[in-house]
Image (tube, coloured by chain):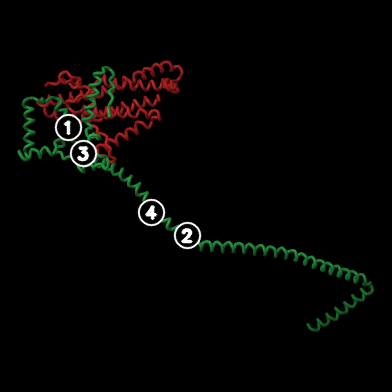
Chain colours: A red, B green
Amino acid sequence: MTLTLFDQFSSPQLLGIPLILISMLFPTLLLPSPNNRWITNRTSTLQLWAIKLTTKQLMLPLNKPGHKWTLILLSLMVMLLMTNLLGLLPYTFTPTTQLSMNMALAFPLWLGTILIGLRNQPSISLGHILPEGTPTPLIPALILIETISLAIRPLALGVRLTANLTAGHLLIQLISTATMALLYIAPAISIIVSSILLLLTILELAVAMIQAYVFVLLLSLYLQENI
Amino acid sequence: QHRRCELFLFPPFCNTLNGLFLTIYRLLHAKRTFHASQQCSAPLPPLPEKPGQVRYGLIPEEFFQFLYPKTGVTGPYMLGTGLLLYLLSKEIYVINHETVAGASILAVLIYVIKKYGATVAAFADKLNEEKIASALAVKNDAIKDLETAIEQEKKEQWRVEGRSYLFDAKRNNIAMLLEANYRERLLTVYNEVKKRLDYQVAMQHLKRQKEQDHMIQWVEKNVVQSITPQQQKESIAKCIIDLKALSKSAHATA
């Protein structure tokens, strides 16, 4: 079957049955199941170590009520990490390339932080809109700007993830198409292009992990402001 | 354990979805059918030392062993090559840009695993070792503390034996202190009494001296008074004659 460049972004289906749910749940299969041992095998030990490290890094700046968000933020991060990493394999569909899914993840969580802030400490929450020490004539303009910046956060979160992953995947496809096309015309250039592809793949691996972390880190920052 | 379905839209859809989740969950965690078998939780069977043997990171050794009796050593390789060529030639697997992308990601993955695999495994082993070591350290520290306590107890018991000597020494010490204190006070008393007696003696001496001095003065005064001028002249002349005689004898001897 001949693939176009954008076939990897179309929602997967088998004879009309949408497989999107399975593809979203697939990454969980890669995680080792919880063991009732004290000393586990290497995979479980490494997973535990990694999760402990990230949890400490992510959750230390938050105060006590913020620690209630640990489970959702950590599981979100693990899911994003696994989904992004799996998407680098050929012929896979990455759910996080779909804007709909990323907005569905970003918007409710961001809204949750805002509502918590407005409910528990409304004046402090609203006070974040005006930074300290602004000269008086600038205040109206700054309030407008800060409100817009606040409202655009969920959009930014979702679009950042989508754009990074989509762009990365698309670049990989483009450069591999170029490699293949140049293979018969000028094989030497093809080899150079394939080395670019290798570097790009390494970058994509890094981006996949970083974007997951950044998503959750920003959410935790928004939470820090409001809780 | 049941996983709750969060889609509240259609109950029948929800039921089938719930059933799907349950099936998937049971498939994934089949080894946790605690109530259905004779499994016992403790003691847990030990983890195997090595993972299942795999060739080329993908195909288990058991597959090669399975084909060995009928096709020998090269059997699985022939099967693999033939399968691959069949898929390629019949275009069941089409070579397109995804192949190249897949090849590159495969290359990166294999490089990373070959280079850092052993390090990561050693790190995981070290984590486990540290866990065990810390627990062992707790146990060993407790044992050491108890042993130290036992030794100290034995030393205390030995000390108890010498208790009577200690008390004797202390008693002697206290007696000496008391004695010294008593003698000191005795000395103080003696000194005080001596001071008072010395004072009385000094007073008597002074009185005697004063009386003597007074008497001498009175005698001298009376004698001087009683010397008449006539007597004075006579005594002076006599003194002059004596002096002359003396000077004469001094001249004679010199």
* Comes first in the chain, label 1 or label 2: 1
Horizontal arrangement in the rendering, residue A183 relative to residue B16 (left or right): left
Q: CA distance from mark 3 to mark 2?
A: 67 Å
Q: Quadrant of residue A199?
A: top left
Horizontal arrangement in the rendering, residue B112 relative to residue B228 (left or right): left
Q: CA distance from mark 4 to mark 2?
A: 20 Å
Residue type beneath disc 1:
Leu
Across and down, in percent, residue A201 comes to 21, 29
Q: Chain for mark 3?
A: B
In terms of secondary structure, where does tag 4 sit?
helix
**Of the numbered discs in the image, which one, if any, rests on residue B106?**
1
Whether residue A204 can be seen here: no
- Badge 4: few (under 14), some or many (20 or more) residues near its Cα, within 10 Å? few
Q: CA distance from mark 1 to mark 2?
A: 78 Å
Q: Which residue occupies the foreground of this view, B101 or B9? A: B9
Same chain for marks 3 and 4?
yes
Q: Are marks 1 and 2 in contact (CB under 8 Å)?
A: no
Which residue has dot 4 on it?
A: B147
Across and down, in percent, residue A119 comes to 41, 21
Q: Which residue occupies the foreground of this view, B3 or A15? A: B3
In terms of secondary structure, where does tag 1 sit?
helix
